[in-house]
Amino acid sequence: MRRISEIGELGVIERILECLDLMPDMPVPFWDDASAVDFGGGMLLVVKTDMLVGETDVPSGMSLFEAARKAVVMNVSDFAAKGVKPMAIVASLGLPRDLTEEDVVQIGRGLNMGAREYGTYIIGGDTNEASDLIISCSVVGFCERNKFMKRSGARPGDILAVTGLFGKTSCGLKILLDGLYAPSDIRDALVKSVLMPEARLKEGLALASSGAITSSIDSSDGLAWSLHELSRSSEVGFIVDDVPIAPEAIKFAEFHNLDPVELSLYGGEEYELVVTVKPSLWEVAERTVEKVGSKLIRIGEVIEERKILLRIDDSTIPIKRRGWEHFKSK
Amino acid sequence: MRRISEIGELGVIERILECLDLMPDMPVPFWDDASAVDFGGGMLLVVKTDMLVGETDVPSGMSLFEAARKAVVMNVSDFAAKGVKPMAIVASLGLPRDLTEEDVVQIGRGLNMGAREYGTYIIGGDTNEASDLIISCSVVGFCERNKFMKRSGARPGDILAVTGLFGKTSCGLKILLDGLYAPSDIRDALVKSVLMPEARLKEGLALASSGAITSSIDSSDGLAWSLHELSRSSEVGFIVDDVPIAPEAIKFAEFHNLDPVELSLYGGEEYELVVTVKPSLWEVAERTVEKVGSKLIRIGEVIEERKILLRIDDSTIPIKRRGWEHFKSK
């Protein structure tokens, strides 16, 4: 009998999906970042649930306030990637018995802050005793069926783009978990990227309205992992010309003699959007994101062959399916 | 600094609520069994989240299949109590690393069974590693705003009623947790009430349509606790004339020299509905529930004074606020 540490998170999800009856006319397949129900009139009810677990999702140095806020942000990020405005959030808590009253207040404030930053509210929840901290949020919202940005839909020739620079969280985690040193002028930015992540909600909503996007995912499991997921859902490949790396990550990598591209591809806990764009509407998409104060960065192209490649000078190397996988990763 | 084991679950919820900004025009207050958002046209989007935790919610003798099914049923029961049809369910899982592939299949089957029994589907979820088994389900659905059965709304003179007999789960838990003996002709029914609980969904939907109900709650934390919650939300009291006890519970109580009324009032993990009914529409409510094959049982009356009393012959005794409270109970 195999343990789940052998089959990994993907194996676990596959086993569970094999047990589930499929809702007829499910508008969004399993494996996408959020689920939906068609309720007529061309509208979808969208719902997403994502659980934060103390042991794996709360690095040392993260306060309970930050953990609770992050539990909300990671759910909002999935809504952002689908282009759906979060309408309300419920939070189910598992709390160790030895927490103090002040700890609970910090959790309450973090939940509220996460919700209010994205214009939504915590409207209910559930409280339980558990041996580890568990914060399981669920978000609900509506969107027009044809504006929901799925993981599937990328076509060869589409432009591959992201909403920001990569690598800061990898460096931040090395500072927090491994105690690596960082010069004071970059330390704050690197650590903050882990402790106070931000979801690209306004960018996602704008992109969904542009009509330019053919597929979308967030980069919460790392850029490489996201590309592999988009590839699987869209049945295409990617060639990445350029990985946009945050200057703080480049400086940190230089200092520790690390590869900044590695840090940027195989990170995680990063909430940029990774999208594919119809070439004819690239400028529309670019302008749309500029209008909300951000930048859409072209990083490559969709190809027919199901390979994920990084171009370096005149050759290419494969980008591996590597990132955090529950049960397998340690 | 007080620990949450001192302030208890109610204290924890109060501390968190103090931190939350209130959504404007929230149609259902905090503390009710489900949350809702008004989305116009007299309709509510209803959402409920409830977490099952291995250590506290899965008694010895309960299989992973049964635990996963129960995680769905306890959410459906809250929808039943509000008179709302569950449209879809998402499940967030925390799984210990040493589970086997077969364990995961059992969880998948239990989730699916729980959903399909109530005409709904699991449409998505999230998988995580955790030190204890965690199954956090969230249910979504719609209802007409004026059909949502709140906890508030009971008026003095209303009839207090329930959808079934009490006491079996208390006995079942004594068998499973304390190893108490039960004669073979009742053992199965008592144990089954714990392992394979059923939500009163068709009864709740029928009652919501009847227009006869002024307040409603499920009895998942015990009948006594539910009465205290209804009392707090509706700002009324109750006088209970009669606690309807399952014959198997009476027999078990006799055998062990236990008080069957105690077993029935202060149990839990029982999913009957506890409702108050407009006296002029009592027969309508009764017939409505009969039509779906069940029975609405009158157990007392709503009184103005905020006391919860049990009538015994010519006197009354208080029904205590006692039941399972996380962090305080052991």
Image (cartoon, coloured by chain):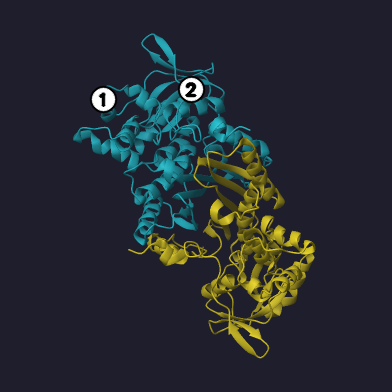
Chain colours: A cyan, B yellow
Q: Residue at x 52, y 64 (%)?
A: B28
The answer to whether residue B53 is visible is: no
Name the outermost residue toward the top. A314
Q: CA distance from mark 2 to mark 1?
A: 36 Å
Helix or strand or loop: what does disc 2 sit on? loop
- The quarter of the image holding the C terminus of chain A is top left
The answer to whether residue A275 is visible is: yes
| Chain designation of label 2 | A
- The quarter of the image holding the N terminus of chain A is top right
Q: Residue at x 63, y 40 (%)?
A: B103
Question: What's the residue type where badge 2 is placed?
Answer: Asp
The image position of residue B62, as x and y in percent, is: 65, 52
Disc 2 marks which residue?
A158
Tell me: A171 left or right of B166: left
Q: Examine the rendered structure and indicate whether residue B247 appears above or below residue A12.
A: below
| Callout 1 crowding tier (Cα within 10 Å): few <14, some 14–19, many ≥20 | few
Helix or strand or loop: what does disc 1 sit on? helix
The image position of residue A315, as x and y in percent, is: 41, 9
Numbered label tally: 2
| Chain designation of label 1 | A
Toward the viewer: A183 or B279? A183
Disc 1 marks which residue?
A256
Question: What's the residue type where badge 1 is placed?
Answer: His
Mark found first going from the N terminus, 2 or 1: 2
The image position of residue A318, as x and y in percent, is: 45, 16
Toward the viewer: B91 or A42? B91
